[in-house]
Image (cartoon, helix red, strand yellow):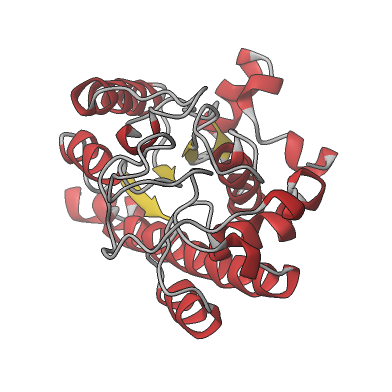
Amino acid sequence: MGTDTDRHFIERMRWDEVARHIGNGAAAILPIGAAAKQHGFHLPLNTDRIQAEWLASQLAGRFDALIWPTLSYGHYPAFVAYAGSSSLSSATFEAVVHEIAQGILADGCRKLFVLDTGISTLAPVERALARLDAGKVMHLRIHDGPRYRQAAERLAEQNHGSHADELETSLMLALAPHLVEMARAEPSPAIGQEAPGPLTPLDVNSPNYSRSGSFGDPTLATLAKGEILLAAMLDDLREQVAAFVTEAAAAQPRSGMTRSVSR
């Protein structure tokens, strides 16, 4: 990431700088992206974190927001059979998200965007944020926007997938091509269902067997697909954030009007 986006990450700032930005009305972004989660033979374990921090930096640059340190441990039960992959229980992860989000709002941030790159993390994050002020918190699900879904449907050639697959590998070719080893990309067998149970690299008789850990066909990934998918994803996120900011501003009482009524 370039120096222009570095200024939004609070871990690289002093506390009084953070306080000043919050006092000036800066929103907060909490990225959620695993750093210890297998992504096949061809992608690094921090693939989700790379995506989360890049997307957060793009949003922060547009909306002048502060980025909290990435929550890089989460609820990822489907991958624990692969070396290096860690997963918190759903309850623990939910509690962690809630306490961090609650603390960010307590610091005085008027709005908080939780940028979620996972799938199994979605439900716990929803539950965690449901206990906070709905007018201040928004859950950004990076794969749920209409532009991204349409682009994915149009571009995908694989017949199944959702992890370290054609789409995610294409995204990484656009974001960090030097980290993608396409020569090692290996498709997983067609498991026959959209959402398999925990994958296994050892039990060849399991319906959830995947030697590499991918679920889909990453060999079909291309840079061109990744650029289209990434642009669509970012447009969706920008639109969601802009709408939430506008709605929040509209919901606030106008100070001038309040004073005139009170006379």
Which residue is drawn at the image coordinates 49% and 27% (left, top)? 72
Task: Name the spot of residue 182 as percent of width and height, x first.
Answer: 73, 55
Which residue is drawn at the image coordinates 22% and 34% (left, top)? 128
Q: Residue furthest front?
A: 205
Q: Is residue 48 above or below residue 11?
A: below
Which residue is drawn at the image coordinates 37% and 29% (left, top)? 74
Displayed quadrant of residue 43: top right
Displayed quadrant of residue 202: top left
Frontmost residue, 19 versus 220 = 220
Q: Is residue 28 above or below residue 139?
A: above
With 72 as the anchor, is 47 left or right in this view? right
> How many circles with numbers are drawn on the protein?
0
Frontmost residue, 51 versus 182 = 182
With 178 as the anchor, is 11 left or right in this view? left
Frontmost residue, 46 versus 68 = 46
Task: Name the spot of residue 100 as percent of width and height, x first.
Answer: 36, 23
Which residue is drawn at the image coordinates 35% and 37% (left, top)? 203
Q: Residue furthest bottom?
A: 154
Displayed quadrant of residue 200: top left
